[in-house]
Amino acid sequence: AQKITQTQPGMFVQEKEAVTLDCTYDTSDPSYGLFWYKQPSSGEMIFLIYQGSYDQQNATEGRYSLNFQKARKSANLVISASQLGDSAMYFCAMREARTSGTYKYIFGTGTRLKVLA
Amino acid sequence: DAGVIQSPRHEVTEMGQEVTLRCKPISGHDYLFWYRQTMMRGLELLIYFNNNVPIDDSGMPEDRFSAKMPNASFSTLKIQPSEPRDSAVYFCASSSTGRGGRNEQFFGPGTRLTVL
């Protein structure tokens, strides 16, 4: 079963507009972490934002914010004032604890965002 | 501060050959991860280490793959013998426990492996 679901394989947004990338997750671990990464066409993976399961407020990092709805198990990424350089693949990821005391890291399949001039 | 360093950046080899990918994590980081990315399977976690000790290798595809971390500043991922289906981009990432619980991963530039 998919633990991280990104239902939008591709999206377009007009420059300077805001865009929301969807991510839903599934875990029974009460203490987990959610991450968003950006992968431009050059290939590197860039950390954008983190939300802990116990964090009371939605995380924000500059133009990035995470719309965390714990009851719905969703962690959508909001990019405000889109720029051409935001065109990239975006991955949602989760860190959850295992009964063995180790962690498990799972990445979604990604959403490809194209910002239009 | 230097980021995660991987070498080589590109590797082309023939089926049956041994391939060794190298990674130098960010200094002070206590976690190191190896990932594989393909179009078909997306980004897969192969193995990760904590304080140089392998913690979870359940993602390693088969016995042909092995990973070591002899010290805090160096890790290798070895494929022996290599097969065409191993062609992928292999990423190394590192993270630190001490970052307020975030433990976000910093990725290297990747090694693009092509097995002919």
Image: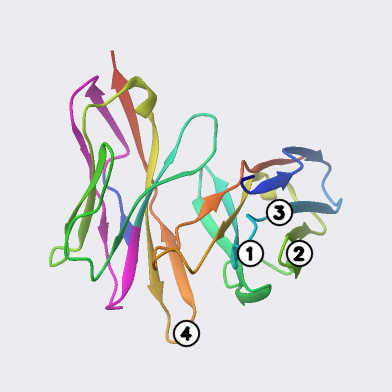
Q: What's the CA distance linking mark 1 and mark 3?
A: 23 Å
Q: SS of the residue at dot 1? A: loop
**Residue B47 is one of the magenta-drawn residues:** no
Mark 1 / mark 3, whichever is N-terminal: 3
| Crowding at mark 1 (Cα within 10 Å: few <14, some 14-19, many 20+) | few
Which numbered tag is attached to residue B64?
2
Residue drawn 82% across the image and 57% down it: B81
Mark 4 = which residue?
Answer: A101
Mark 2 / mark 3, whichever is N-terminal: 3
Mark 1 = which residue?
Answer: B61
Residue A87 spot, x, y in % from top left: 37, 27
Q: Is residue A2 visible?
A: no
Residues at marks 2 and 3 on the same chain: yes
Q: Which image quarter: residue A83?
A: top left
Position of B42 compared to A67: left or right?
A: right
Q: Amino acid at mark 2?
A: Arg
Q: What's the CA distance linking mark 2 and mark 1?
A: 8 Å
What's drawn in magenta, residue-wise?
Answer: A8-34
Query: Which one is nearer the viewer's eye here, A57 or A103?
Result: A57
Q: Amino acid at mark 3?
A: Lys
| Crowding at mark 2 (Cα within 10 Å: few <14, some 14-19, many 20+) | few
| Crowding at mark 4 (Cα within 10 Å: few <14, some 14-19, many 20+) | few
Residue drawn 63% across the image and 54% down it: B26
Chain of the residue displaying label 1: B
Q: What's the CA distance linking mark 1 and mark 4?
A: 22 Å
Chain of the residue displaying label 3: B
Q: Amino acid at mark 4?
A: Gly
Query: Which one is nearer the viewer's eye here, B8 or B19?
Result: B8
Mark 3 = which residue?
Answer: B24
Residues at marks 4 and 3 on the same chain: no
| Quarter containing the N terminus of chain B | top right
Q: Amino acid at mark 1?
A: Pro
